[in-house]
Amino acid sequence: MIAEPAIRVAGLRKSYGDQEVLRGVDIEVARGSIVALLGSNGAGKTTVVRILSTLLAHDGGSASVNGFDTATQPRDVRESISLTGQFAAVDEILSGRENLVLVARLRHLKNPGAIADELLVRFSLTDAGRRRAGTYSGGMRRRLDIAMSLIGNPSVVFLDEPTTGLDPQARIEVWNTVRSLAAAGTTVLLTTQYLEEAEHLADRIAILHEGRIIQNGTLAELKRLLPPARTEYVEKQPTLEEVFLAITGATASDDRRAHDTTDGTER
């Protein structure tokens, strides 16, 4: 038997006044997979996510998450999902651990301290757990934000442009975090305008353009849409990102050690 998709969208439509943003979006997301919703600014990516997370009502079509209709069963949808927006929603006055404990208590979970400690270990934030979140680097703040969103073990996670504004090392940290979520069986719908991000992370890529999904497939399937490649000798030049990482001599783990200092400063 074929498993029910974690996310199913059919003919989804949404307008703001006279502006039609979604013009019949169709997409399915298999359980335990990473699907990248790729599109330029204003393509409607965030609108899709807001509808799927029950923050916005749609004008037409249907949308379901974990088998629950977003329009008629919003509470069931919210209990099984998590949403991480474009900007980290952490309380910078509280420590990292206090942020996690707060969310666990708001969800009425038992042993919030133990839950917080487990997530600090999972996201390599233990050493920085008792520091104010306001002292964290961008990558650390985003990791904490994603950790907070996983409290309660949601089976579906929406990540709306999670690496916006992050430096290359922090972006790699977030990519590793997303991969670990999928490896643990979590379904991830990722919106991004970065082609490289979709290429590195996604099992399938859906391209949203002018309110519709115009292509949806694996990276290999999308590449086959172009004419066959010709074999030519090309001298490969390093990318700017490769130059940056080589000069700094840093990896994602090096970046964590550089920022996770005990005095709360960044080196």
Image (cartoon, grey):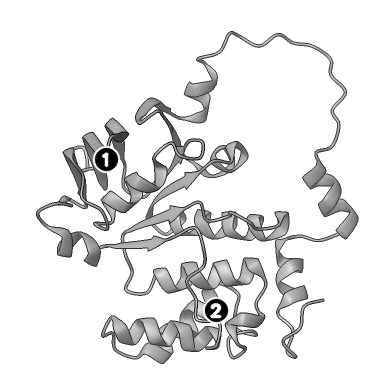
Q: Which residue is mark 2?
A: 121
Q: Name the quadrant containing residue 123.
A: bottom right
Give whichever of 181, 240 is nearer the camera: 240
Residue 154 in percent (x, y) is at: 32, 65
View extreme (left): residue: 72
With 242 as the anchor, is 147 left or right in this view? left
Determine the secondary structure under disc 2: helix
Residue drawn 51% across the image and 63% down it: 87
Q: Name the quadrant containing residue 36.
A: top left
Residue 1 in percent (x, y) is at: 17, 38
Work out whether residue 255 can be spotted. Answer: yes
Residue drawn 51% across the image and 67% down it: 88
Quadrant housing the C terminus: bottom right
- Alpha carbons under labels 2 and 1: distance apart: 47 Å
Residue drawn 26% across the image and 39% down it: 14
The amino acid type of the residue labelled 2 equals Val
Give whichever of 185, 202 is nearer the camera: 202
Query: Residue 72, labelled with which disc?
Result: none
Residue 98 in percent (x, y) is at: 48, 89
The answer to whether marks 2 and 1 mark residues whose Cβ atoms lie closer than 8 Å is no
With 92 as the anchor, is 183 left or right in this view? left
Give whichever of 212, 264 is nearer the camera: 212
Q: Which residue is mark 1?
A: 17
View extreme (front): residue: 18
With 61 as the anchor, is 30 left or right in this view? right
The amino acid type of the residue labelled 1 equals Gly
First in sequence: mark 2 vs mark 1: 1
Determine the secondary structure under disc 1: loop
Residue drawn 52% across the image and 56% down it: 162
Q: Is residue 69 above or below residue 25?
A: below
Instruction: Give the total number of marks visible in the rendering.
Output: 2
